[in-house]
Image (spheres, helix red, strand yellow):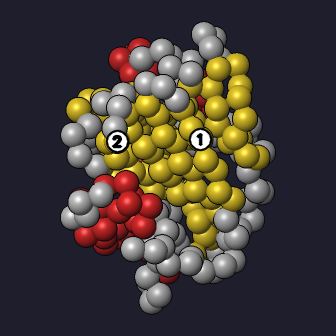
Amino acid sequence: MCTVSIVPATDGCRVVCNRDERHTRPVARPPRAWPTEVSWATYPQDPVSGGTWIGVNDDGLVVALLNRAATQDESRLSPPSRGSIVPTLLGCVSIAQAVNAYHTLDVQRFEPFRIVMAHRSIVAVVSDDPLRPPAELFPLVKPVMFTSSSLGDAVVAAPRRRLFEQLVLADDDWLRGQFRFHRHQWTRRREISVHMTREDAATVSRTTIHVTSRAIDVDYEALDRHAPAVPAAA
């Protein structure tokens, strides 16, 4: 599961993703460049599936995947990895093309998920959730946040969203607030924190992608899954 935020920045945007995984999951491989059908994309790789949960291509398109808790009716038998979806969409040169490519996927083969994309000043959200529109596109005029948890999205969404409003939206420097938000851990509520930890799982990495018209920067932090978060400086 993940927490993803997107903050508008000068001439672009910054996307940060905390990845939460069970302790039994092997450590991911750090980002490297991979060929796509039209150019190159940079993303970390899950050694089990060979896929990824976040990446960016040479056109500045950022794609992130959040798992969605399945209902009993949505359970699939031996589904393919959701990690294959992000590399597929990173083969697109625009957010509109990526949304169209998403709609050609047989999404019912996969366990439930949600895809968040950012390209320049546009954000798109696509989901296989029958209770939500299949695609939502909107301009990035203020910071936005998306989150999920194996505890249940409803369990973590409200407290994390309130924290996002306090640390990011209320800060006169959104990028500073975003930095603090993704490193935040409640001492008595570590299991629902943005930088979470519990007996069977923890935040295992943090990926930051900063895109402008001049450069694409990818920073990847592999985290000690057994260590508590270090409070971020104000």
Q: Is residue 191 visible?
A: no
Residue 42 lies left or right of residue 127; in this view the side is right
Secondary structure under the numbered disc 2 in the rendered image: strand
Q: Residue at x 30, y 49 (%)?
A: 144
Q: Residue at x 60, y 10 (%)?
A: 38
- In percent of width and height, residue 174 lies at 31, 55
Q: In this rendered view, identify the residue nearer to me: 180 or 173.
A: 173
Residue 80 lies left or right of residue 156; in this view the side is right
What kind of residue is marked 2? Ala
Q: In this rendered view, identify the residue nearer to me: 41 or 131.
A: 41
Residue 140 lies left or right of residue 160; in this view the side is left
- In percent of width and height, residue 146 lies at 37, 52
Up-down: is 92 above or below 132? above
Quarter location, residue 166: bottom left
Residue beneath disc 2: 9
Q: In this rendered view, identify the residue nearer to me: 10 or 201.
A: 10
Residue beneath disc 1: 218
Quarter location, residue 179: bottom left
